[in-house]
Image: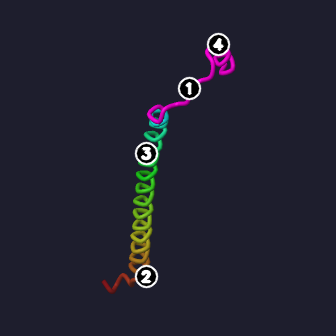
Amino acid sequence: RLGDYEQRHGNLPDPTVAQLLEANRPFCITWAETCDKLRKADADLQRMQRVRQSTVKMLEVLETLIDYFEDEDPGSM
């Protein structure tokens, strides 16, 4: 297709800096949006990991309390 165009119209002119910047703009916008989404996903993942760690610690405390009260002599209360 490019060859057909060049045969009919001659060589294509070199793009201007403005044209190159305009052609690059959608890529830059998409890249920025993707980076923002990745940062948000990373922050969400870190938050979920902290919640998981807290939950594990709470369950360990509960398990310790359950073990303690199961081992208690019922007459000592």
Kindly identify which residue carries mark 4: 8
Find residue 76 and report its horizontal and vertical position in percent: 33, 86
CA neighbours of label 4 inside 10 A, class few (<14), some (14 to 19), many (20+): few
Return the mark for residue 71.
2
Q: Is residue 55 magenta?
A: no
Q: Amino acid at mark 4?
A: Arg
- Between the residue at mark 1 and the residue at mark 4, the CA separation in whole angstroms equals 14 Å
Quadrant of the drawing holding the N terminus:
top right
Tell me the quarter of the image containing the C terminus.
bottom left
Dot 3 amino acid type: Ala
Label 3 neighbourhood size at 10 Å, few (<14), some (14-19), many (20+)?
few
CA gap, disc 1 and disc 2: 88 Å
Residue 34, placed above or below residue 74:
above
Front disc: 2 or 4: 4
Q: Which residues are magenta?
A: 1-19
Which residue matches tag 1?
Answer: 13
Q: Earlier in the sequence, mark 1 or mark 2?
A: 1
Measuring from the top left, give residue 28's x and y in whole percent.
46, 41
Please state which of residues 73 and 39 is positioned toward the viewer in this rendering: 39
